[in-house]
Amino acid sequence: MDSSKKLELQKAAAKVRMNVIEGTFNAKSGHPGGSLSISDIMTYLYMYKMNVNPENPKDENRDRFVLSKGHTAPALYGALALRGFFPEEEIKTLRKADSRLQGHPSMHMTPGVDMSTGSLGQGVSVAVGMALGAKIGGKSYRVYTALGDGEIEEGQVWEAAMFAAAKKLDNLVVVVDNNNLQIDGSIDEVNSPYPIDEKFEAFGFNVININGHDFDEIDAAFTAAENCKGKPTAIIAKTVKGKGVSFMENQCGWHGKAPNAEQYEQAMNELKEALSCLK
């Protein structure tokens, strides 16, 4: 990836993170930790990789994205707003009763959302179905889905993985946001899914391990996924929960807690400073 595009994506990711903080602060609820850890992946997909058009969000030839870890909707909304699917000002309406931006994504309410998600483990199955539909229909669009590393403790994830490999769905990319923390603590203490890469390999996936905050590694992985034929790809993205906000990083307590006014100011100042340093 050339340096100018990388810088552009880094700036966009900082703005997506600011949207995460803006939304959860105004909602007084939400899930900032995992939203911040997946923000770079979301930025890359919506600002660079995916074939999507805010002017025609239901284009039948568009690439599809399913946020299987639906509670991190603030990151998805942050990226969609930045891409132009709706005004960024709407981020402040997160979780309000009359808002298009509910606590979990709704395909019926939010422009650019391809699937309603929230019940962990189910989103990846829908993504597999979308990928199979593309194959049957002779369509060239690709399907991407993001799962939490705690989410892959769900058995349905592995049923979907087995089916995806059996059907040779090379148009499917599964991203695991491996920040090592879930609501009750570290994943290895709660119910360890490690080694994640070897499990997906055993289920027949092409597996790529990356630093989920490095755009060069992110780009190389998604490019490799496009070039892999005959099997789906799993990208295991090592990330930091709460990435970009010092007091949220690597703290499971920020899985589902909104910042107060003082914390909001500190978080926004840190992210603005990070943005200003990107030149």
Image (cartoon, helix red, strand yellow):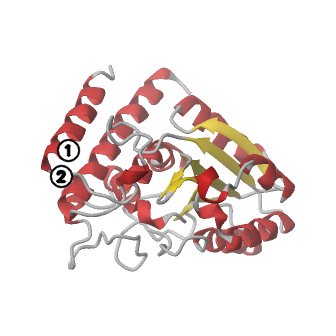
Coordinates of residue 172 in the picture (x, y in percent): 69, 59
Coordinates of residue 235 in the picture (x, y in percent): 67, 47
Q: Are marks 1 and 2 in contact (CB under 8 Å)?
A: yes
Q: Secondary structure at mark 1?
A: helix
Locate residue 113: give its quadrant: bottom left
- Residue in the image at 38% along x and 40% along y: 13
Relative to the observer, which residue lies in front, 190 or 48? 190
Relative to the observer, which residue lies in front, 253 or 111? 253
Mark 1 Cα within 10 Å, few/some/many (few <14, many 20+)?
A: some
- Horizontal relation, residue 216 to residue 131: left or right: left
Q: Secondary structure at mark 2?
A: loop
Residue identifier under label 2:
260
Coordinates of residue 76 in the picture (x, y in percent): 41, 57
- Residue in the image at 56% along x and 47% along y: 180
Task: State whether residue 216 is above or below residue 128.
Answer: above
Coordinates of residue 157 in the picture (x, y in percent): 68, 68
Residue reaching furthest to the left:
261
Marks 1 and 2, Cα distance to the nearest angstrom? 5 Å
* Residue type at tag 2: Asn
Q: Which mark is residue 120?
A: none
* Residue type at tag 1: Gln
Q: Which mark is residue 263?
A: 1
Task: State whether residue 109 is above or below residue 228.
Answer: below
